[in-house]
Amino acid sequence: MAKTSELLVGKWDTLHENGAFDLKRQYITRHEHKATMPSRVLRYNDAAEEIQRLIKKCETENEGFRAFGSRWSMSKIAHQKDNMHQNNLMYLDLEIEEGDMHPDSEYAHENIFFFECGSTIKQISQKLNEYGKSLKTTGASNGQTIAGCISTGVHGSAFDTGAVQDYIVGLNIITGPNAEDNVYLERHTQPSLNDAFAQSINARVIRNDDLFNAALVGLGSFGFIHGVALEADDLFLLDRYVRRIDKNLTLSLSKTLDFENSEFKIDNEVDENGKPNRPYHYKIFINPYVDEDQYVVEAMYKKKYTLAYPDPFTKIEKSLYKDLIYLLIKFSEKFPKSIPWFIKSLQKSILPEITKDEEKIRATLYETFWDAGYKGPAFACSMGVTIEDSERALNALVKMTKDHPIP
């Protein structure tokens, strides 16, 4: 049987130390050993029964119960003061056979995979690599659990793909302590797995687009997400370039994404007619305290996977963000008026280095967005606007930061 440790902790905190928050108990569930229960499906179902036992216990005691994964959220939104369950030791994957597919499914069987809630983006990427597959997109690093990613809406890093939750095709959610409270949920317009698969994990089937879409980014409020079915891509490579280009051209591209008719061209990234290719990923680095005619941009282009490419990690380590967040925070707490000068002085250390064509980085998605080195206190703020309004939004933010400097 799966076993759960019950810890009386008193306090709980996020990875970025945005707490601490009051907490009575922390639960950590471990599967039955493979030696005594070889079947992954049986171990998965056994864990589900254990979660339902814990829910029943909390319900009887009139206390709350919520799950967490890698603790990457930067707020107390996912917090519950009574009982919280640590999911990261529940990382089974279940084999999806061709006979598990729904008869009306339009998904290719070989692209559908099923992972337990505590599986991290890194673990999933490593498993998919064994099949010559890849996630479609991830956040900028890989430590989050899959249930945590979709529940909090971890953004993607690619055009035309969406965010992490957009390639999820099925959810196994435990909503209570009773047998009927174990649910397999998916869209009725895009079914993926059949009723027999749901029965194998002791779940009843609900196919409803609105319910599925609501539950995807549910911040843990729809129940305990025990497993997810996802659609993977064939393994691919990304060629990454960093350029400094005209500010107006940079912002024009951000408003239109019309790369084909743009002056922004990388010699190796053109079609047969010489027109610029559309990148997989396009990012602009802006220092709001400096008025410049050019901005640094990062562009990545999707390529077919081939085995022969140089080890990317030596370049990736030097080319991504340098971790100055904590230093900036400490310095700016004492000298807030010095922030613009401080950031301008460190700009070369913070921004990625400009690369020549021969210096591009070629890597898989997993290698490009790999382990995050930064842990500790952080504050982040994000907002969504239509791309047509991106320049107006930027101008408003730049004005605000000049009036009220922030690091």
Image: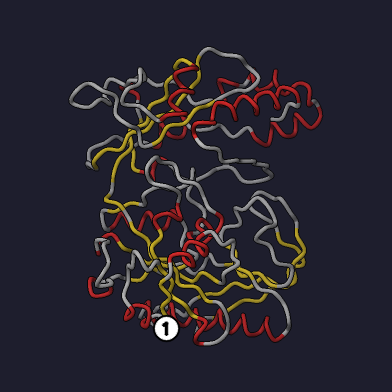
User: Which residue is label 1 attached to?
Assistant: 202
Of all residues, the one furthest to the right in this rendering is 334
When asked about the image quadrant of residue 204, the answer is: bottom left
Residue 208, percent from left and from top: 43, 69
Residue 85 at x, y = what percent? 61, 70
- Residue positioned 24% across, 43% down in the render: 305
x and y percentages locating residue 215 in the rendered image = 52, 65
Q: Quadrant of residue 240?
A: top left
Check disc 1 and give the amino acid type.
Asn
How packed mark 1 is, by other alpha carbons closer than 10 Å (few <14, some 14-19, many 20 or more), is: some
Q: Quadrant of the C terminus?
A: top right
Residue 275 in which image quadrant: top left
The relative height of residue 305 versus residue 56 in the rendered view (above or below) is above
Q: Residue at x 35, y 71 (%)?
A: 94
Task: Indicate left or right for 104 with 175 as reference.
Answer: left
Nearer to the camera, 15 or 242: 242
SS of the residue under disc 1: loop
Residue 329 versus residue 150 in the image, above or below: above
